[in-house]
Amino acid sequence: MVFWSETCSHCIRYDVYLNSFSDSHPEISLVAVASRQGENLGQIRATVAARNLRFPIFHDSGGSVARQWFTQQTPRAFLIDMERRLLYRGAIDNFKYPQDPEYGAYLEPAIEAYLAGRPIERKETASFGCAVESVYYILPKALA
């Protein structure tokens, strides 16, 4: 599961990764949860069409799922096994491109270890990205 936003520039960077996820990992289901304050179903549908997104997206209107999962920014990934045990949570990677010598993947090594039956070495990483909810999104009126 990945908490995702249609407007978050950090999430846009992962379009290709998320679109190819089911091809790369047919044994794992992926769902994106769109919880960002102010995003509506119409915006999400338009984004799906414009960016040709092929992964399933659940619209978490009001952000209740994000609050239940203590998620404050997008993207934030969770790897959960068949018994609903949390195996990994955090960033997909260190937000560098794979060709960058300082690139570090976080989610993929966790998936590889899980599928191979090995212990996951890094079970949690800090997330970064766009806020799911912010007072700046709901200012009552323009500042004078």
Image: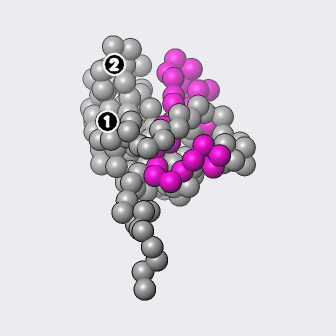
**Residue 119 image point, x, y percent:** 27, 23
Q: Is residue 47 visible?
A: yes
Answer few, some or many: residues within 10 Å of disc 1's Cα (few below 14, many 20 plus, some between 14 and 19): few
**52 left or right, relative to 88:** right
- Residue found at the far front of this picture: 140
**Range of the magenta residues?**
19-44
| Residue at 44% across, 32% down | 1
Label 2 sits on residue: 84
Answer few, some or many: residues within 10 Å of disc 2's Cα (few below 14, many 20 plus, some between 14 and 19): few
**61 left or right, relative to 135:** right
Q: Amino acid at mark 1?
A: Gln
Q: Earlier in the sequence, mark 2 or mark 1?
A: 1
User: In this picture, is 79 found above or below 131?
Assistant: above
Q: Quadrant of the C terminus?
A: bottom left
Label 1 sits on residue: 68
Find the distance from the CA under tag 2 to the CA under tag 1. Answer: 15 Å
Q: Is residue 98 visible?
A: no
Check if residue 30 falls in the magenta segment.
Answer: yes
